[in-house]
Each structure stands twice: as structure tokens, then as C-alpha cells.
């Protein structure tokens, strides 16, 4: 066993943990990263299902902290596939010699604040106990798979694969009859690829999703060279944008409801041809706030489904009608709807035919047995709080984070929770995180945490902590910003609605990446109001609403 005391322990070696380690080294702090997997990658290590790829353009879904790295790395496609993103993260780990401070195959089981020592004690499944002044969680927002509670699941006689925990040597679907349960991003990406190989695929759909085309393609050399010439500007724009991206269709200045139908149609056709999330999220200033405006976009997307899917009854089932477009995470596809024109694919509508149980032979829905060899669970994640909830995290007075968050997560700026001193969450609940380009948001958090740690450099015993009043104000602000939007109207994982028993609380901060950055920067510039140092702090917070571009 190596060294056991560090300035900082970081949990997770995905995009967040790797950059955090790089930053800590820059600050001259000793750090140890603990990682459950046997390699770096986080999400991109675990989600190896067929068709897995990024739904943000790779030139933007990548680190900006090193201009050299940015110039060296070549992306082969507009939206990189999982193997390519994993190779990128492996390259980053090697290029910056990060691996020597990462302990792989090590699951953190417990993290406990030690009052007397003013630091954290972290226990692992390897029997190690490590200590550090700070503990930083980079455990990801979508990293704790949600296994559905379907009766008889464990009785199935064939193989069950979970998209978020896919086997490393892949799955051969040749000649197999496959059931895919779940039609979110993971299902929508994997179903077309599985269908090309399998004998038959039965898709079990509970709620149809709004889907826009990726329009993926190889990235031409000249295009990449042009991007590289302007990378600094591009990154700067992304940092101050709404969603953490700079490229893509710009939002229309005109509300959808004020746009003549023929103009709207032309505009949406252009967005469809361009592809990607950006063209249809925040496409118009009114679509996030006004259900009728969102309906204009929804009608267009349903029209597209009907134009692709040949069987009218199947097309109707694939058209979402029960929630506003954008209120559940928009999905980006490559040939999803076309897949339902294949002879070997059937759609099972779980509203008409709910899953009764799973037997040794297959899935029984609406009384009918779907006899299959393989079940693929594309049933999502216990988002934002799930990975933290799996660790027994104890703050002051032995309070469990899980208990503190039993009615929903409470943080100050998504970075710290009151009662959990010297502990940070990278892209924690209450920050833009999943509602943004994750890499932009990760870098912003790591830089901000790095700035604070640098500030504490000359006072190595200082204990920093979110003040309860600040946490209360921020948590209320996160809810208040989400409340007037369509986001509150769907049973989405943003609201925890996909996990039975999880409190219905809107978890990410929807005020925009640029707004949130400005708030964090103002807090730092004002001497960190809302954060107590050794029990003392300024309670007078900035007026968070004043940062928003829209009326509160
Ligand atoms: P998801 O969006 O939560 O989708 C899960 C699917 O499983 C939904 O269709 C859900 O139906 C269904 N489901 C859950 N429990 C079920 C049950 N007991 N019976 C039947 N159906 C059930 O999960 P995901 O597809 O893994 O995506 C999660 C998020 O990860 C995405 O929104 C995205 O942010 C991210 N992601 C991104 C990419 C990418 O392109 N980069 C790829 C994959 C994932 P209901 O809708 O009715 O709940």
C-alpha cells in the first residue's frame, strides 16, 4: 500500500476527475484519484453499448484547458463514438502523466468528515483508509444505472445487458431475438445498430421521445483546421453561452408564436438539415416558457416521424404527445425511426400492453409472451444524486448526505453542501451540469474550485463550508428559475421522476452556463459570500436573479 494522506482525494477518473487532478498538480497539492473501473473514462468507460456516441459536437465536447492538446487531437467524426472518446481520455491521462496518481479498481465505500483532524477519511473496497484535507467528487451525473423493478427479471433464462454497464468484449446479436426496454437516448442510439445484427428486435416503449437527427458525418480536414484556428474564440463563446456550446444553429430572435407558419417551417427545416440538439432546444425565445410555442416545435417533429415511419399506427405510437418538447432530454439519432421500417423490428406500446413480468423465456406484456434470447435494459440512471448516494458520505455530526438530501438535493451553487466542510461536487445538483455541455461545465467547476483552493493556500488549516442560509437561498433560486418553464411538466430524470420514490425536485440549474459562470465569478470576486471560513462568512449574497437575461 502506498501513501495514505493527501491534500485532496478526488473520486472518479472521468472528464471531471482527470482535469481536477491536472489542476491540483498545477496548484502544487498532493492528490489521489480513486476510480472504480480499471481505466479512466467514467461514462465513456462504462457506456460501451452499440451506437454509443456523443450528442454534442466533439470539437466542443472536449477539454479546452490545454491549447496544445486541442491542436494535436483529431476528431474523426462530427459526433465521436464511444471508443474514440475513450481513446481521447486515455490519451489525456497519458499525455499529462495523470495515471500515477490514480488508483484503479478502487470503489469508495465511505467518506467521513473528521472534526478533530479537520479533514476527510475515505474508505475503499480494497480495505484502504485514506485521509485528506479536501474531498472532491467527480462521480458523474449519469453514472448510477437504474435497474427497473420488473417482476421476474432475475428469472430470465437468457442474457441481460444494461446499456450503462456494457461488457467490454461486446455482445454478438447475430441470429438472436432481442428485447430492448427503454427508448431514451441510450435505447435510441443502440436500437438501430442492434437491429442490423439481430434476428428480431422487440422495442418496449413506455414514453416516446422527441428525437432530432445528428446528421453525423466525417469531420473534414479543412473543417477541423478552420476550427483549430479559432478555437480560443469558440471556447470563450461556449463559456458564456446558454448551453456551453458555441457552434450550431443560433436561437431565432423571434418567438415561435410570432413567426408566420411558412417561415417557421423553413427555419425548422434548416435546423433539421443541420442536425443536433442545439437547433431544437431554445430554438426560439418562447419555447422554454410557453407550452403553445413548444407545441409548434413538437408538431414539426411529429410530422417528421410520420414522414419516415411507413406504418401509420407505428408512427403515431412513436410521436410524443404527453409533455412539451424539451422538457425531457431531447434525443439525437442516427436512423432510429427508419429502423421501424425493417421487417425484424416491432414496437410494443407499454401503455396499451404493460409489462406484466419477465419469465425464463422472455417478456410478458399485456398478457403476450415475447420470447427472446437477450434483454437489453436501456432504462436510464438514478441521475445527479445516484452515484453519491451509493457512497456512505458523512459530514459534521455524522450526518449522512443521503439523509440531508432525502427531500431532494440541497447545495450552494451545486458545489458544496452545508454541513459537509471541505467537500466539493463537480457538476453537482444545483449547477448547469446535465443541461449543458458537460465538459464546459466540468472545466468551469474545476477552475472555480482551483481558484478557491489557491485562495486558501496560505492558510492550510482553514475549513471552508457552504453556509446553511446560502444553501437555502440557492436551492430556492434553482427551483424558482425552473418553475415557470416547461421543464416542470414532464416526468423526467431531471426531476428524479424515473426512479420510484425519488423526490420530485428539479436538480440542474437552468439559468444558463454563462449566467451561472457570472454568478460563480461574482461570488469569488466578492470574497466568497455564502461560504464560511472557520465558521465565519459573509451572509450577504449577490442577487442571483439580477444575473439572468430573462425577467425573473
Ligand atoms: P433515459 O432517458 O432515462 O431513458 C430510459 C428509458 O427507459 C425511458 O424510455 C423510460 O421510460 C424507460 N424505462 C425506465 N424504466 C422502465 C420500466 N420499468 N419499464 C419500461 N420502461 C422503462 O435513459 P438513457 O437513455 O440512458 O439516457 C439518460 C441520459 O443520458 C440522456 O438523457 C442523456 O442526457 C444521457 N445520454 C447521452 C447520450 C449521448 O448521446 N451522448 C447517450 C445516452 C445517454 P419513461 O420515459 O416512460 O420513463
Image (cartoon, rainbow, N blue to C red):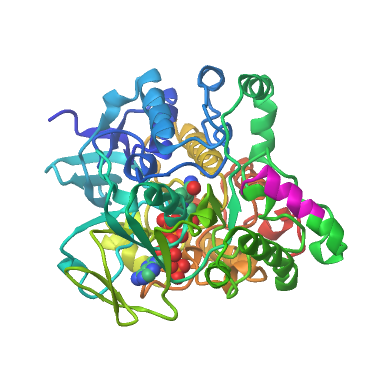
User: Would residue 505 be seen by someone viewing this image from the given angle?
Assistant: yes
Examine the structure image and report whether residue 272 is included in the region drawn in magenta: yes
Examine the structure image and report whether residue 173 is included in the region drawn in magenta: no
Q: Position of residue 384 (x, y in %)?
A: 42, 57
Q: Position of residue 24 (x, y in %)?
A: 41, 29
Quadrant location, the C terminus: bottom right
Q: Which residue is at the far front?
A: 343
Residue sitting nearer the eye, 492 or 535: 492
Q: Position of residue 436 (x, y in %)?
A: 57, 48
Please state the quadrant of the image where ligand 1 appears: bottom left
539 lies left or right of 110: right
Q: Position of residue 244 (x, y in %)?
A: 62, 43
38 lies left or right of 516: left
Residue drawn at (69%, 23%) of the image = 230
Residue drawn at (51%, 39%) of the image = 439
- Numbered circles on residues, count: 0
Q: Which residues are magenta?
A: 266-276
Residue sitting nearer the eye, 525 or 101: 101
66 lies left or right of 131: right
Quadrant location, the N terminus: top left
307 lies left or right of 252: left
Q: Main secondary structure of the magenta part?
A: helix
Residue drawn at (64%, 56%) of the image = 511
User: Would residue 530 be seen by someone viewing this image from the given angle?
Assistant: no
Looking at the image, is 187 positioned above or below residue 499?
above
Amino acid at each position: 500500500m502506498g501513501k495514505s494522506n493527501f491534500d485532496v482525494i478526488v473520486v472518479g477518473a472521468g472528464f471531471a476527475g482527470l482535469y481536477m487532478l491536472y489542476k491540483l498538480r498545477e496548484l502544487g497539492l498532493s492528490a489521489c484519484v480513486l476510480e472504480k473501473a480499471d481505466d479512466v473514462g467514467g461514462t465513456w468507460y462504462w457506456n460501451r453499448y452499440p451506437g454509443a456516441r456523443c450528442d454534442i459536437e466533439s470539437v466542443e465536447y472536449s477539454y479546452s484547458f490545454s491549447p496544445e492538446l486541442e491542436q494535436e487531437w483529431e476528431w474523426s467524426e462530427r459526433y465521436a463514438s464511444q471508443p474514440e472518446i475513450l481513446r481521447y481520455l486515455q490519451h489525456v491521462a497519458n499525455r499529462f502523466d495523470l495515471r500515477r496518481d490514480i488508483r484503479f479498481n478502487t470503489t469508495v465505500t465511505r467518506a467521513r468528515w473528521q472534526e478533530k483532524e479537520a479533514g476527510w477519511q475515505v474508505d475503499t473496497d480494497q480495505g484502504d483508509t485514506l485521509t485528506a484535507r479536501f474531498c472532491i467528487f467527480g462521480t458523474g451525473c449519469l453514472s448510477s444505472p437504474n435497474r427497473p423493478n420488473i417482476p421476474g427479471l432475475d428469472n430470465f433464462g437468457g442474457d441481460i445487458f444494461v446499456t450503462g454497464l456494457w461488457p467490454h468484449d461486446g455482445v454478438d446479436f447475430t441470429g438472436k431475438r432481442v428485447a430492448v426496454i427503454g427508448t431514451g437516448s441510450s435505447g435510441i442510439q443502440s436500437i438501430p445498430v442492434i437491429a442490423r445484427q439481430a434476428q428480431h428486435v422487440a422495442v418496449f416503449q413506455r414514453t416516446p421521445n422527441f428525437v432530432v437527427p445528428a446528421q453525423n458525418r466525417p469531420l473534414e480536414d479543412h473543417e477541423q483546421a478552420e476550427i483549430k484556428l479559432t478555437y480560443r474564440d469558440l471556447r470563450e463563446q461556449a463559456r458564456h453561452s446558454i448551453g456551453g456550446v458555441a457552434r450550431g444553429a443560433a436561437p431565432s430572435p423571434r418567438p415561435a408564436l410570432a413567426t408566420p407558419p411558412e417561415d417557421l417551417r423553413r427555419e425548422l427545416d434548416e435546423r433539421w438539415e443541420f442536425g443536433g440538439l442545439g437547433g431544437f432546444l431554445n430554438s426560439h425565445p418562447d419555447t422554454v416558457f410557453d407550452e403553445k410555442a413548444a407545441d409548434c416545435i413538437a408538431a414539426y417533429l411529429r410530422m417528421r416521424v410520420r414522414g419516415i415511419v411507413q406504418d401509420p399506427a407505428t408512427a403515431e405510437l412513436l410521436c410524443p404527445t404527453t409533455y412539451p418538447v424539451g422538457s425531457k432530454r431531447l434525443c439525437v439519432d442516427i436512423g432510429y425511426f427508419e429502423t421501424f421500417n425493417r421487417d425484424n423490428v416491432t414496437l410494443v406500446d407499454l401503455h396499451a400492453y404493460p409489462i406484466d413480468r419477465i419469465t425464463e423465456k422472455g417478456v410478458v406484456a399485456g398478457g403476450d409472451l415475447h420470447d427472446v434470447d437477450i434483454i437489453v435494459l436501456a432504462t436510464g440512471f438514478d441521475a445527479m444524486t445516484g452515484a453519491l448516494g451509493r457512497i456512505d458520505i458523512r459530514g459534521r455530526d455524522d450526518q449522512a448526505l443521503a439523509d440531508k438530501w432525502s427531500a431532494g438535493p440541497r447545495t450552494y451553487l451545486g458545489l458544496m453542501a452545508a454541513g459537509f466542510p471541505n467537500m466539493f461536487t463537480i457538476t453537482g445538483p444545483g449547477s448547469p451540469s446535465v443541461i449543458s455541455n458537460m465538459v464546459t461545465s466540468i472545466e468551469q467547476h474545476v477552475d472555480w474550485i482551483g481558484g478557491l483552493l489557491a485562495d486558501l493556500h496560505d492558510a492550510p488549516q482553514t475549513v471552508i463550508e457552504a453556509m446553511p442560509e446560502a444553501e437555502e437561498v440557492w436551492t430556492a433560486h434553482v427551483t424558482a428559475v425552473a418553475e415557470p418553464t416547461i421543464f416542470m411538466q414532464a416526468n423526467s430524470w431531471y426531476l428524479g421522476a424515473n426512479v420510484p420514490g425519488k423526490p420530485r425536485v428539479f436538480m440542474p440549474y437552468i439559468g444558463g452556463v454563462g449566467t451561472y459562470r457570472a454568478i460563480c465569478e461574482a461570488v469569488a470576486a466578492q470574497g466568497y459570500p455564502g461560504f464560511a471560513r472557520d465558521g465565519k462568512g459573509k451572509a450577504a449574497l449577490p442577487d442571483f436573479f439580477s444575473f439572468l437575461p430573462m425577467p425573473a
